[in-house]
Image (spheres, rainbow, N blue to C red):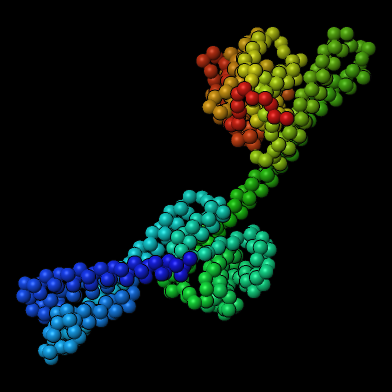
């Protein structure tokens, strides 16, 4: 394919040169008919030389054209006509001067053409570097950075170039295992962070040039130029590759440093979390345990001295404390599991009505005289971990039941809105103090405690709800509504209408 293209280009430029000489010859015959001297006609032939020097890429076209024009001029316009003999010796000087002037003309033209090409290449290099720098201003993943680097290198060199990351080293070596020297050079460059291949001290015989993309002591990837030994990288090309590689290496090192810093921050936060949790446990579990111990001791020591109503009252209190303690422990267990959840948790499409009905059944035992209204479309499907979302809805319903008057209205709903499922718990039970709204979802904050007044604790329920919703890439928020109560709103991003549930 390259040989065919070269042949086509050669024919194209040869045809242009022939056409330029033909046009100049026609013009010269016209001037000759007007009686213009041969010396003046010879100047006309400088025009095709100028055009050929500008258009054709090689000196060869201009040189061959100059010789052809001299022969043509001698044959057509010098006496004796239509022969290569010259009667006037002075014309030899004119022909020699023409040859000199035409040579200088195409040399100067080609020099200017070369400078223009160099300027274009410099502009292209500057544009690619500027574009790559702008691309790196935003936070990018390693694959994105390496892909854009490969794109710029290939657009500049128009030759086979490969960018192999450290994670891809094994697969690349396996793919090219038949090329032992190449695999050895790739392993060498990854291990030593030094270049190898064509033009380098290591494996210089290879028809490849391998340049490591490094920052500090780490090699992130290799740039592999699949060029023949006949091609050499110019200093400007090498500088361009070095500049692009430096930008990419610095961006990857910065990203790695940010990730390391984030990991350190998360580790510190986890340690703080554990310390706070242990302090909280000592107080929050002790409170119901003390109540249980006091009540059971009173029953065991004074059972017969107590009236039936007193025994029932103590038993009821013991049951409430046991339930509150059990609920608190369940919240702690849930909270410990949330930390290990990721966006890869198993999900399936669940009916929103089923999720609400299960949460409703779980909290049915603590209903007082509340008026519960459920508004859910029968065919609304939500892609989620059903067990976790039921826990969120159950927690929100329990909060509404325990923090409102016994006769207030509570409306539970689920609706489809622009590809999202929107769950709401709306009541008219007095609302939430504005000072507490901003801390409802904080871990261990008193405002986050929406348990019963008997057992306040540090309230992990809403913190757990927020963690579960975040794992589903959703949102949860609370605000006071116009009905004089509170509204809790949960949005989950993956929902649809009218399809059967996934098996």
The number of numbered badges drawn on the structure is 0
Is residue 450 visible from the viewing direction of this image? no
Q: Quadrant of residue 290?
A: top right
Judged left or right of residue 80, residue 289 is right
Judged left or right of residue 319, residue 421 is left
User: Residue 280's x, y, as percent?
Assistant: 72, 35
Judged left or right of residue 361, residue 238 is left
User: Relative to residue 259, is residue 231 depicted above or below?
Assistant: below
Q: Quadrant of residue 111?
A: bottom left
Q: In the image, what residue occupies the spot 74% across and 15% down?
A: 364
Judged left or right of residue 289, residue 229 is left
User: Residue 369's x, y, as percent?
Assistant: 69, 8
Q: In the image, what residue occupies the spot 73% across and 30% down?
A: 503
Q: Say which of 319 and 110 sits in front.
A: 110
User: Relative to residue 69, is residue 334 depicted above or below?
Assistant: above
Looking at the image, the residue that sits furthest to the bottom is: 89
Q: Say which of 206 and 276 sits in front.
A: 206
Q: In the image, what residue occupies the spot 60% across and 77% down?
A: 203
User: Residue 120's x, y, as percent?
Assistant: 34, 64
Q: In the image, what residue occupies the spot 53% across and 27% down?
A: 418
Q: Say which of 257 and 297 sits in front.
A: 257
Is residue 86 visible from the viewing direction of this image? yes
Q: Quadrant of residue 293?
A: top right
User: Relative to residue 260, is residue 383 depicted above or below?
Assistant: above
User: Residue 155's x, y, as percent?
Assistant: 45, 60
């Amino acid at each position: 394919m390259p040989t065919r293209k070269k042949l086509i280009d050669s024919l194209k430029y040869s045809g242009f040169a022939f056409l330029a000489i033909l046009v100049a010859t026609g013009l010269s015959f016209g001037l000759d008919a007007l009686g213009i001297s041969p010396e003046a006609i010879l100047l006309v032939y400088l025009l095709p030389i100028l055009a050929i020097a500008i258009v054709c890429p090689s000196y060869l076209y201009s040189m061959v054209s100059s010789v052809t024009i001299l022969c043509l001029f001698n044959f057509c316009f010098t006496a004796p006509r239509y022969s290569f003999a010259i009667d006037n010796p002075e014309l030899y000087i004119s022909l020699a001067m023409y040859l000199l002037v035409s040579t200088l003309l195409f040399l100067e033209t080609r020099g200017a053409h070369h400078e223009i090409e160099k300027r274009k290449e410099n502009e292209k290099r500057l544009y690619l570097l500027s574009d790559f720098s702008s691309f790196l201003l935003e936070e990018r993943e390693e694959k994105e950075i390496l892909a854009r680097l490969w794109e710029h290198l290939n657009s500049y060199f128009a030759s086979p170039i490969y960018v192999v990351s450290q994670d891809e080293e094994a697969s690349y070596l396996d793919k090219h295992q038949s090329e032992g020297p190449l695999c050895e050079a790739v392993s060498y460059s990854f291990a030593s962070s030094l270049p190898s291949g064509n033009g380098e001290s290591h494996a210089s015989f290879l028809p490849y040039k391998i340049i490591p993309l490094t920052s500090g002591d780490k090699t992130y990837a290799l740039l592999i130029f699949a060029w023949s030994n006949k091609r050499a990288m110019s200093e400007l090309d090498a500088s361009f590759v070095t500049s692009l590689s430096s930008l990419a290496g610095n961006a990857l090192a910065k990203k790695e440093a940010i990730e390391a810093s984030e990991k350190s921050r998360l580790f510190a936060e986890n340690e703080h979390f554990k310390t706070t949790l242990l302090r909280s446990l000592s107080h929050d579990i002790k409170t119901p345990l003390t109540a249980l111990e006091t009540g059971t001791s009173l029953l065991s020591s004074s059972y017969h001295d107590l009236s039936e109503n007193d025994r029932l009252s103590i038993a009821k209190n013991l049951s409430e404390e046991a339930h509150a303690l059990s609920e608190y422990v369940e919240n702690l267990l849930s909270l410990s599991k949330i930390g290990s959840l990721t966006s890869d948790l198993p999900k399936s499409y669940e009916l929103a009505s089923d999720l609400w009905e299960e949460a409703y059944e779980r909290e049915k035992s603590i209903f007082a005289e509340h008026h519960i209204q459920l508004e859910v479309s029968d065919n609304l499907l939500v892609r989620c971990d059903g067990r976790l979302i039921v826990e969120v809805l159950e927690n929100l319903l329990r909060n509404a039941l325990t923090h409102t008057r016994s006769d207030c209205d509570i409306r539970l709903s689920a609706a489809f809105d622009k590809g999202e499922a929107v769950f709401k718990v709306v009541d008219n039970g007095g609302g939430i103090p504005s000072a507490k709204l901003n801390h409802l979802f904080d871990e261990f904050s008193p405002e986050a405690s929406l348990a019963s007044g008997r057992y306040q604790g540090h309230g992990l329920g809403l913190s757990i709800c927020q963690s579960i919703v975040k794992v589903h890439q959703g949102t949860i928020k609370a605000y006071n509504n116009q009905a004089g109560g509170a509204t809790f709103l949960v949005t989950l991003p993956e929902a649809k209408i009218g399809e059967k549930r996934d098996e």
